[in-house]
Every structure is written in C-alpha cells, then in structure tokens.
Image (cartoon, rainbow, N blue to C red):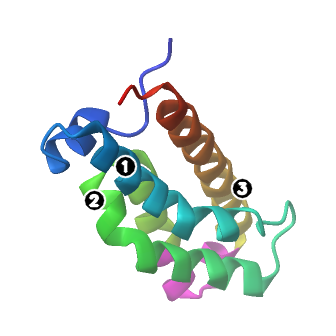
C-alpha cells in the first residue's frame, strides 16, 4: 500500500480522536475541493491556470492543516512561476498544471476512500 498523501493522524488529532468529527473535517475539505477539481482541463487555458492558483490560495490553510506537503510545495513553485511571468517560467506552467491537477484528483480519491473506511 502506498503512503497516504494526507496525514490522517493529524486529522484525528484535530478532531480530538473523534471519528465523526474527523469525517466532517474531510467532507468539508472535499466540499471546497471537488467542484473545482472537476473543472480541470487536460489542456489548460490561461483562465484554468489562474483558477488553480486561486483554488490553492483559498485552501492553503487546509493544505497546511492536513499536511499535504507534496501538493503545497508544487503549488508554491507554480505560483512563483505564474507570478514571474517570463516566457521561460510561463512555458513551465502547463506541465506543472498537469502534475498538480493529477495530484488533486489523487487527493480527492484518497479522501473518499478514507472516509468510506472510517469506523464510527
């Protein structure tokens, strides 16, 4: 089994070991994340790349709280390249976008599976 992307021990710690509350925390995160993730396009436009930057800004506290370091790090690189605006940095954005969107999809599926397996 692969190592989870999210630190679920952290989720349980935040919920004071209350499984139902932990589920609700994860469900709230999915509620914010899923509608946007479902709009990601395989060939991003400038608007798509702006949308992913806005999403990450909006959920950054949750990314940190759930210790989603891999996603947080990729998004920091993405935002830096996006803000630089040079031709070279802009050329890297579509590849980073694809990596990030793939990671977002994995996170959504992982959380759904984890919620489904939670006992409580």
Give residue 119's position: percent from left, percent from top.
39, 25
Instruction: Please name whichever residue, 29 or 49, is drawn nearer the observer in this view of the structure.
Output: 29
Residue depth check, mark 1 versus mark 3: number of the one nearer the observer: 1
Residue beneath the point at 49% across and 18% down: 2
Q: Are marks 2 and 1 in contact (CB under 8 Å)?
A: yes
C-alpha gap between disc 3 and disc 2: 21 Å
Residue 32 locus on image (x, y percent): 53, 70
- Quadrant housing the C terminus: top left
Return the x and y of residue 35 as percentages of the image width and height. Answer: 68, 69
- The numbered disc on residue 95 is none
The circle drawn on residue 64 is 2
Q: 100 left or right of 18?
A: right
Q: Which residue is mark 3?
A: 98
Q: Nearer the viewer, residue 42 or 36?
A: 36
Mark 3 crowd level (few <14, some 14–19, many ≥20, 10 Å Cα): some
* Whether residue 106 is situated above or below residue 78 in the rendered picture: above
Residue 37 place in picture, x, y as percent: 68, 63
Cα distance in 3D space between marks 2 and 1: 6 Å
In contact (CB < 8 Å): disc 3 and disc 2: no
Q: Residue at x 64, y 81 (%)?
A: 51
Q: Secondary structure at mark 2?
A: helix
Residue at horizontal 59%, vertical 52%? Answer: 104
Q: How many marks?
A: 3
Q: Earlier in the sequence, mark 3 or mark 2?
A: 2
Location of mark 1 (residue) = 68
Residue displayed at 74% across by 79% down:
48
Comparing marks 3 and 2, which lies closer to the viewer? 2
- Tell me, yes or no, whether the highlighted magenta stretch contains residue 5: no
Stretch of the chain drawn in magenta? 79-90
**Side of 28 relative to 16 (left or right):** right
- Type of secondary structure dominating the magenta stretch: helix
SS at badge 1: loop
């Amino acid at each position: 089994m692969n190592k989870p992307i999210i630190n679920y021990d952290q989720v349980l710690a935040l919920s004071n070991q209350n499984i139902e509350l932990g589920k609700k925390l994860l469900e709230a995160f999915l509620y914010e994340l899923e509608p946007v993730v479902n709009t990601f396009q395989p060939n991003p436009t400038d608007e798509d790349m702006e949308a992913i930057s806005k999403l990450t800004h909006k959920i950054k506290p949750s990314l940190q709280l759930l210790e989603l370091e891999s996603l947080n790090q990729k998004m920091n690189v993405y935002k830096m390249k996006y803000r630089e605006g040079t031709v070279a940095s802009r050329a890297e954005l579509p590849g980073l976008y694809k990596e990030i969107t793939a990671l977002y999809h994995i996170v959504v599926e992982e959380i759904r599976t984890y919620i489904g397996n939670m006992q409580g």
